[in-house]
Amino acid sequence: MAQPDQHHPKRGTSTQAVHAGELRQKLGDSLIDPIVCSATYTFESTQSVIDFIEEDQPREEYGRYGNPGERIVERKLAALEQAEAGLLFSTGMSAITTLMMAKLSAGDEVIFFDECYHRSREFCRKHLSRFGVKTLEIKMGDYQALAEAITPKTRLLVSESPTNPHLSIVDLEQFVGIGRKHNIETVIDATLATPINLLAIPAGVDYVIHSATKYLGGHNDLLAGALVGSEAQLADVRALRGIMGCIASPHTCFLLQRGLKTLSLRMRQQNQNGQRVAEFLANHPRIEKVYYPGLPSHPYYELAKKTMTGFGGLITFCVKDADWKTTAQVVDAAGIPRIGPSLGGVESLIEQPLVMSYYKCPPEDRQAFGIADNMIRLSCGIEDTEDLIEDLRQALDGVGKE
Ligand SMILES: *Cc1c(COP(=O)(O)O)cnc(C)c1O
């Protein structure tokens, strides 16, 4: 069997993004991998079915367990993350939920840093609890509290890095150190970082999760999730995925493979847009506060500089002396970014977290999650930096004027 182009750890990320995980010679002598949209896969004879089962042959069987395009993307992602193996899912949330369902049993405990994607929090609070799994939330960055919360029942330590929307950064050395000391596995949702800006597996994290819907796909045209780690640690997750059925479709895998080829290029522009737009906002008189790890004013600036190679396209900022309505005027006045949830794609997106994600959330809870009325989240796409800055300048200058 032909071997995939994979084991070139010295090659740069752009070369890996284009070539890793692919076969050099493909079906029909095509340069590009085809979309194999078969629901099932055939065997030549009864003996070949038996050989497949007895020898655990690496081939397809039925579409819920995998498809050829998915394997390619999994190898490509594993190469980019410097991980042994990868697993793709239908969404980022199914990557998170399937990992938790595979690793946690009734009576187990999982500890989260409290700045996290609101649906991950909801899954733990509302649903894992129904299966007898206890969730503890620790203040982001409080490693002493994290270590003290560990009990003999603790199975997983989970965090995002950077977090959404505050863009706090996990100190992986401390996080992994605590996990290893207590023999507990660690999980980082690195959606906002991508393997271009952060390599968490070489830093010792057990599992890295991505919403591939965001930067990895990069074009706001697919939903997918990814999980990377060691082959042995992913085996039970892979098996559970085959039961839950939350696999990425062949069409999604095709789009994701295509999107990944330009990941490195896109991140370069998005890192630049994020940095320059954050600097512009930080110096603007109508802005009260900017959350961006590439600004010296950010509490995690030093850690980000030490551990990451770029800070991404996501910026959160607060408009000075503005109530939620005035803040909404800024959002509405932006001419380039479209109003919508999500992030990481080539199109810039803007939103007011209060309205988009927390509209029905009681004010006390919003306050506890650090969601201010005057907060705006901007996901810079790959548009020209100067255009984004000029557009925000006119949006901010127009506020409050009739
Ligand atoms: C979007 C997102 C998710 C969920 O991913 P989906 O692909 O929408 O299911 C999880 N974590 C983070 C940090 C996200 O931004």
Image: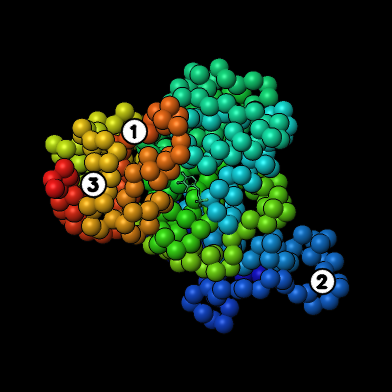
Q: Which residue is mark 3?
A: 330
Q: Describe the element under mark 3 as helix, strand or loop.
A: helix
Q: Describe the element under mark 1 as helix, strand or loop.
A: loop
Q: Describe the element under mark 2 as helix, strand or loop.
A: helix
**Which amino acid lies under the numbered mark 1 shown in the image of this protein?**
Ala
Q: Say if residue 57 shows up in the picture.
A: yes
CB atoms at circles 2 and 3 under 8 Å apart?
no
- Rendered position, 23 above or below 397: below
Tell me the distance, in whole angstroms, between the alpha carbons under discs 2 and 3: 64 Å
Q: Earlier in the sequence, mark 2 or mark 1?
A: 2
Q: Earlier in the sequence, mark 2 or mark 3?
A: 2
Q: Which residue is mark 1?
A: 372
Residue 48 got which mark?
2
- Residue 378 coordinates in the image, percent (x, y): 31, 47
- Rendered position, 327 above or below 47: above
Q: Nearer the viewer, residue 338 or 380?
A: 338
Residue that appears at 15% across and 51% down: 394
Mark 3 CB lies closer than 8 A to ligand 1: no
- Residue 177 coordinates in the image, percent (x, y): 52, 26
Residue that appears at 65% across and 36% down: 128
- Residue 204 coordinates in the image, percent (x, y): 52, 36
